[in-house]
Amino acid sequence: MSSSRRSSSSSMTGPSSPLIGPELVLVNDADSPNEELDFSSDDELSDDFAAQPDRLYASVIPPLSPMLILLYLSIPYLKLGPMFLPTSDTPLSHSIPTLLICASFATFTRELWYLLARYLRKMDIEEIVLDVFARGSDKMRTRLLLRAIVRAGTLTMRVLLASVSLRVSVDALLPLVPAHSPPLARGLLTATVALRIIYATWLSFLAYLTWLGAVSYAHVKGTLSTDLHWQRPGVLWQGITSTAFVFSSSWTIPLYASLRSSVPPTTTKRRRRRSFKILIAASVAITVALVLPLCVFASSSNESDNPEQGVIALISISSATNLILTIPAILITVPPTPLPYAVRRLNPNISKIIIYAITTGLSVLPRGATVVLGDLLLILSLLSTYVLPAFLHITVHYFKRPLSIVLPTSATRTGDGEGDELLQRKERSLQRRRLGRRVFWDAVSWVSVFIGAGGSAWAIGRVLRQW
């Protein structure tokens, strides 16, 4: 009997032996409590996904080691969000609780993505959305529409993030370059995309550490200026919203697929260091440790009338380096633009060229237009990080017909009771054991949806008043 969809959690169990008859039922009560709850590691699912290797290797991210997975889980947090925290003037009584709450919700929502992927056996956000809202061959038009919406939203967010990062890095470097230099945005993007993704990501992480060290030194010496030559991307990029943006990311599902595809199909048990849940928690803990000092700097102004220009230059260069080195990893995950076959046949890389051109063009728009794009990026990022996985979880568990855990689908439909009494007892036992976990994840999902909806309404209202 293959594993089926559950009503209790967004997870799956491994395959079991086919059901021969109602009189011969093997019920293993020796399972550990974690395995019965099905919320331990994802080791027991290796056989399920190994039977479908095409889904694993279809990810845009190739198979990576746990160390690189941890790096890619952490690096999106150390980009635009932390750059504006030292000059936000947010009291410590607000910044620390906001940081910890956002870190907790980022951990929960990333784990919701992970559980949805295991539960639905989908290794792509697009496939998860299609399975939730348009499952079945009779909904082809709905599937086509949803596929187009998901791809358009993904493309918009990736391009906006790359263009805003490029714009902020250019603003940081402009005071340090001669006035008659060639167009800086085009040169930075050309040099950045030529780097290998792994090298660029490691260099980006080192650049963030350099930037953090320079900011810390400037704060201790009293030379940290509140005007670091670059402007905020939008009216929402300050205070609580800027802190919430720190933990925005959309790489969870591709990275999970990358980690699973790095495990040999014959492996039955994996070490704890390969647990995706542990890597999620570690990435959030690393981010909190590297961002917490910035909240302290923002709450205690220690500005000098004569800041050290060398330190300010190092802050600008390291922050710009951190931002531009992440652009390759962002652009490589952009879905291809829909072009006619004749155009793609002339130049297979035409889609990438168009994406690079759009990114560069958006980064050099006038200030008024970039403010709109920056606020749009922040709203979309927060919705996709905190609201979308919770909304999908609620839809799956409240508005989709649930299937049993161990009972055959035919038994749940016909209601046969005598022959399957043992299975029904096992079903009820598993449901009771999972009740606490189910209530917890349901509560997390509802809180995320309500807070996200309220925060989005507030952000949209504030933006409309400012524009």
Image (cartoon, helix red, strand yellow):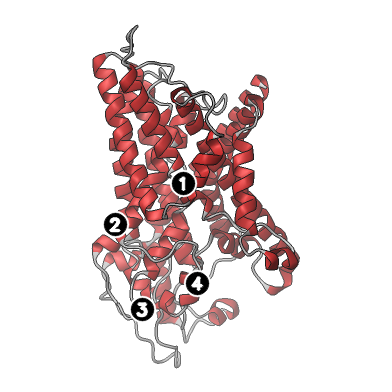
- Helix, strand or loop at disc 1? helix
What residue lies at 49% left-to-right and 50% top-to-bottom?
193
- Residue type, label 1: Thr
Mark 3 Cα within 10 Å, few/some/many (few <14, many 20+)?
Answer: some
Residue 192 is marked as 1
Q: CA distance from mark 2 to mark 3?
A: 20 Å
In-image side of 325 versus 347 (left or right): left
Viewer-proximal residue, 110 or 242? 242
What residue lies at 48% left-to-right and 84% top-to-bottom?
418
Mark 2 Cα within 10 Å, few/some/many (few <14, many 20+)?
Answer: few
Ranked by sequence position, the earlier of labels 1 and 3 is 1
- Residue type, label 4: Arg
**Which residue is disc 3 drawn over?**
265
Q: CA distance from mark 2 to mark 1?
A: 23 Å
Q: Is residue 228 above or below residue 50?
A: above
Nearer the observer: mark 4 or 2; the answer is 2
Q: CA distance from mark 4 to mark 2?
A: 22 Å
Ranked by sequence position, the earlier of labels 1 and 4 is 4
